[in-house]
Image (cartoon, rainbow, N blue to C red):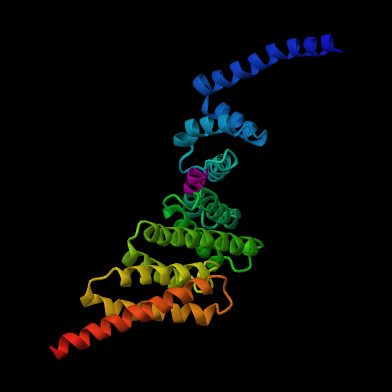
Amino acid sequence: MLKNKIYILILLIPFGISSCGEYQKVLNKGKVEEQYAMATELYEAQKYNKAIQLFEKITPSYRNKPQMERIQFMVAQSHYNVKLYTLAAYYYDKFVKNYPKSSKVEEAAYFSAHSHFLASPVFSLDQKDTNEAITSLQNFMYKYPESEHIAEANDNIKILTKKLEQKSFEIAKQYYHTEDYIAAIVAFDNLLGEYLGTSYKEEALYLKFKSAYKLSVNSFILKKETRIKEAVKAFDRFKRSYPESDYMPELIKLDNILEQELNSVIALKTETNGL
């Protein structure tokens, strides 16, 4: 059995070498028509990397010719299928712009938006591509409201928005952990204002209060009263939103400390004014 497999493999080796040789011959010295035929054949055989090289060769020769519409779409699809999503989006966008009346324009518009979605990086990296993906998906939904891809596009937007939400929360949390409490308070407010239904709301309100608490108790006397009152407001907001939260026992203790601190500040102010 093993000998048979080895024998078959030996027979296939020359065929592989021959195929590779034929490809290189057409790629480097073939006529444009031969390159086009082989590129299409390789595309249909799902050998996209090799097809891309041939498409790049023939593109200048077919510019402004009827075949170019098909070539541009296959180029975009090839890049999509080898997971070069940024390039795929670029070529799909180019196709949509160049062939607005094509029967494949809706398909190209969707795959452009989906390529942007797939190119979106993990939340910890720069989210420029994520914002572009959301815009692309929204534009697709606006232009093709009856498309069969609407539900999937909606789901993709939710995934991308969740990623931006997580990014926003982690930035705010980082400010808190590096003890930049003013920046943390602003960042948590931005998160809560931009993502009204955020799943991070409880923890965001908790850390915002703790940021306000630490800022106030460590403030100079001239700013202390104002900052304590802001911290108390943050606590009251948390208490209204999550009265049964596991954080409440800790926050009640901190709120009591704030009350004592505030009474001390007011007493000192009264004593100073009396002098």
Which quadrant of the structure image shows residue 219?
bottom left
Residue 83 placement (x, y as % from top left): 56, 41
The residue closer to the viewer here, 45 or 132, is 132
Q: Position of residue 134 (x, y in %)?
A: 50, 61
The one nearer the camera, 100 or 87, is: 87
Q: Establish if 25 lies above or below 195.
A: above
Describe residue 98's horizontal placement relative to residue 271 as left or right: right
Measured from the top left, where is residue 82 in percent x and y?
Answer: 58, 38
Which quadrant of the rendered structure holds the C terminus? bottom left
* 16 in relation to 106, above or below: above
Q: Main secondary structure of the magenta part?
A: helix
Q: Is residue 67 above or below residue 96?
A: above
Query: What is the residue that sits farthest to the left in this orientation?
Result: 275
In this rendered view, identify the residue nearer to me: 133 or 269. 269
Specify whether residue 264 is painted magenta: no
**Residue 103 visible at all:** yes
**What's the residue at 36%, 56% (across, down)?**
178
* Residue found at the far bottom of this picture: 274
| Residue 202 located left or right of residue 127 | right
Quadrant housing the N terminus: top right
Q: Residue at x 45, y 57 (%)?
A: 132
Q: Which residues are magenta?
A: 85-91
Q: Can residue 135 be seen in the rendering of this structure?
A: no
Query: Within the magenta stretch, is there residue 89?
Result: yes
The x and y percentages for residue 241 are 53, 79
The residue depicted at 54 percent of the width and 44 percent of the height is: 76
Residue at screen point 58% across, 59% down: 156
